[in-house]
Amino acid sequence: GENVEQHPSTLSVQEGDSAVIKCTYSDSASNYFPWYKQELGKGPQLIIDIRSNVGEKKDQRIAVTLNKTAKHFSLHITETQPEDSAVYFCAAMWSNFGNEKLTFGTGTRLTIIP
Amino acid sequence: DSGVTQTPKHLITATGQRVTLRCSPRSGDLSVYWYQQSLDQGLQFLIQYYNGEERAKGNILERFSAQQFPDLHSELNLSSLELGDSALYFCASSEGLAQETQYFGPGTRLLVL
């Protein structure tokens, strides 16, 4: 099955600086890569996603890049703010009509230092 | 707010007992997924239902079962509970089959004493 590795497990960044979280996946058939943000006491919230036919996607201060050859994808957060502090999870999905499973990375606890 | 609701928010019970967790998907979503989140295992996929039918199974124990009802809400039944079953249980929903975007509920925190 799919295996997703995520690094680093913890990350502290000065407010205003950029944060980068990296993930690698094992199944070359995976074709969908979402990123979730989980705040304390809440469920994971989708913040951005990318499909395998796209190399990069941006949404305001958040961007995701995908390298299919190397089987890795990264989350970039620019101009970080205190409200960006949370646990971030990457995930990879192998999707075949009627059969799809989302495998998550182990999470990165991001702390923004004011 | 994702539109996915889960009840109860917290649940405390004893070993050997049985509990039922409930999930209502977003309006219009036909697929429901259950996940377990523990400190040492991260987010683990348990099972998926689509329009009342089981579609995919993950790391779900035989002591656990789920179903999806005609009104599309779902229940996860956990029986013969053990201390190690203490975790956060999340439900997620998506529009249908081959719909990758999943929206998560707020979770049920289960504590087995």
Image (cartoon, coloured by chain):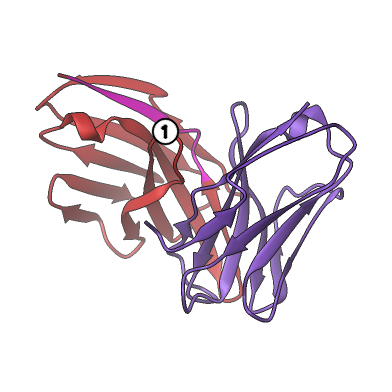
Chain colours: A red, B purple
Residue B6's place in the image compared with B43, above or below, is below
Task: Tell me which secondary structure the magenta stretch mostly adopts.
Answer: strand
Q: Nearer the viewer, residue B9 or B67?
A: B9
Please provide percent x and percent y for residue B49: 66, 69
Q: Residue at x 55, y 47 (%)?
A: B107
Circle 1: element type: loop
Quadrant placement of the C terminus of chain B: top right
Task: Answer whether residue A108 is magenta in the image.
Answer: yes
* Image quarter of the N terminus of chain B: bottom left
Q: Is residue A14 above or below residue A28?
A: above
What's the residue at 38%, 26% (across, down)? A109
Q: Answer whether residue A108 is visible to the viewer in this image.
A: yes
Quadrant of residue B38 within the rendered picture: top right
User: Would you say residue A110 sits in the magenta stretch?
Assistant: yes
Q: Please provide percent x and percent y for residue A77.
A: 19, 38
Residue at numbered disc 1: A40
Q: Is residue A69 visible?
A: no
Where is residue B58 drawn, in percent x and y? Answer: 70, 53
Residue A108, by quadrant, is top left
What segment carries the magenta color?
A: A104-113
Q: Which chain does the numbered disc 1 sit on? A: A
Give left or right: position of B64 versus A42. Answer: right
Is residue B101 positioned above or below A21 on the image?
Answer: below
Instruction: Report the residue at 53% width, 67% height from top.
Output: B25
- Horizontal arrangement in the rendering, residue B15 relative to residue A84 (left or right): right
Q: Seen in the image, is B15 located left or right of residue B55?
A: right
Residue at x 49% of width, y 49% of height: B106
Q: Tell me residue B9's x, y (percent).
A: 58, 45
